[in-house]
Image (cartoon, helix red, strand yellow):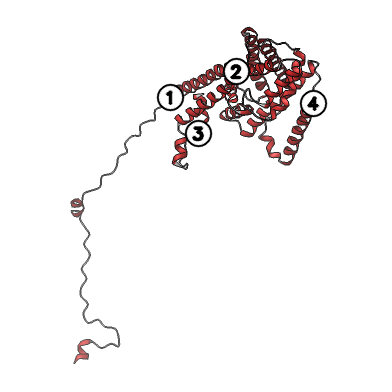
């Protein structure tokens, strides 16, 4: 997170006041990053106080499935929807960095903003970057509804109405905006083809399955049991509360999930413990993989700079000295022969007609 804070922060500009400039120094940014991460970890660890004695093996198995879904399927879904020509490793690394920042921010907003920033660094326009990340989020929401329907769960009517209405509203808004401002067509990303869109939905379903496995694992770890299909419906319904942001492990979405488990017959203490355990376990791959991704990105930037500095620079040809004419000195100029002007004879008695001579007038 030290590298994340240093990468996200901006250097002070000449027009910024001195106090604001001091607050933007690299040391302050790093300390702020450490404080944000520590606050998030402490909030999740504090929630572990509600966790009763739990078994480690089911939790580890559930966490393993979650890591595959979150850090493999989700980057592949993003790559399937993206028009960027980056490698799969780039998408995996950028997504891991974003997840670390998302765990530190309410509503996981930091993850989306960091992905937009990463796309902008590669030359993408901001509108295209935001559209790409929004499309990834939309396909993720479609995956939630599709997974719940495939599992045979009866979804609450508000969830279905909200999902379908939100999809139709988004499509209508984009259509109206593009019709009103045709120039935006060049800025927004092009829609993926049917095969890429189907692949993105398949990756989204795989991620939802990994989350379900983790939920079953943490519920089993606290000594309770629940029907996985019913738990899938409860998890999908709890996403309605995700519109209200909140910290990791204490958000309205986590509360809705806990009360949904209680409705399925899980004791209240076990339900709260399972949700808190799930939130705390998410930090393990987030810190490990996110920090590693930042280290790899920093190392790649340094290698690129070193490689550019080591490139042989073509030497400019030496400009030959041009001969400058020497000016003669002042004594030499004085000794040069000067042409003598002809002597003029004095005029004698030449007066205009009708004007008497001066001598005659005087007489």
Regarding residue 73, the answer to whether it shows in the image is no
Q: Which of marks 1 and 4 is in front?
A: 4
Residue found at x 68% / y 39%: 183
- In the picture, measured across the screen, residue 146 lies left or right of residue 68, that is right
For label 3, the residue is: 10
For label 4, the residue is: 160
Contact (Cβ within 8 Å) of mark 1 with mark 4:
no
Q: What element carries label 4?
A: helix
Q: Residue 309 carries which label?
A: 1
Task: Mark 1 or mark 4: name the one nearer the start of the chain.
Answer: 4
Spatial CA distance of label 2 from label 4 is: 35 Å
Instruction: Name the spot of residue 40 as percent of width and height, x first.
Output: 57, 24
Q: Which of marks 2 and 4 is in front?
A: 2
Q: Is mark 2 on a helix, strand or loop?
A: helix
For label 2, the residue is: 49
Instruction: Name the spot of residue 122 as percent of width and height, x first.
Output: 57, 28
């Amino acid at each position: 997170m030290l590298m994340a804070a240093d990468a996200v922060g901006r250097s002070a500009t000449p027009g910024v006041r001195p106090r604001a400039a001091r607050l933007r120094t690299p040391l302050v940014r790093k300390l702020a990053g450490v404080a944000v991460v520590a606050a998030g970890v402490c909030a999740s660890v504090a929630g572990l106080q509600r966790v009763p004695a739990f078994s480690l093996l089911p939790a580890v198995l559930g966490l393993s499935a979650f890591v595959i879904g979150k850090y493999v399927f989700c980057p592949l879904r993003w790559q399937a929807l993206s028009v960027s020509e980056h490698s799969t490793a780039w998408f995996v690394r950028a997504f891991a960095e974003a997840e670390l920042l998302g765990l530190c921010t309410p509503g996981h907003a930091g993850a989306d903003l960091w992905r937009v920033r990463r796309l902008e660094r590669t030359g993408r326009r901001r509108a295209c970057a935001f559209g790409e990340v929004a499309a990834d989020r939309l396909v993720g929401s479609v995956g939630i509804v599709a997974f719940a329907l495939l599992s045979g769960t009866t979804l609450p009517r508000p969830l279905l109405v909200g999902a379908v209405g939100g999809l139709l509203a988004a499509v209508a808004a984009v259509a109206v905006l593009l019709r009103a401002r045709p120039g935006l067509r060049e800025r927004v990303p092009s829609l993926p083809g049917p095969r890429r869109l189907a692949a993105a939905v398949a990756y989204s379903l795989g991620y939802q399955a990994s989350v379900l496995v983790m939920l079953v694992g943490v519920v089993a770890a606290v000594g309770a049991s629940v029907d996985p299909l019913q738990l899938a419906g409860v998890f999908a319904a709890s996403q309605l509360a995700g519109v209200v942001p909140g910290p990791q492990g204490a958000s309205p979405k986590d509360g809705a999930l806990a009360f949904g488990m209680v409705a399925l017959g899980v004791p209240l203490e076990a339900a709260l413990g399972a949700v808190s355990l799930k939130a705390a376990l998410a930090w393990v791959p987030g810190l490990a993989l996110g920090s590693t991704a930042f280290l790899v990105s920093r190392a790649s930037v340094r290698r690129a700079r070193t490689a550019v500095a080591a490139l042989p620079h073509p030497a400019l040809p030496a400009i030959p000295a041009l001969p400058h004419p020497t000016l003669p000195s002042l004594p030499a100029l004085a000794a040069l022969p000067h042409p003598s002007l002809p002597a003029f004879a004095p005029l004698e008695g030449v007066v205009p007609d009708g004007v008497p001579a001066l001598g005659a007038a005087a007489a």
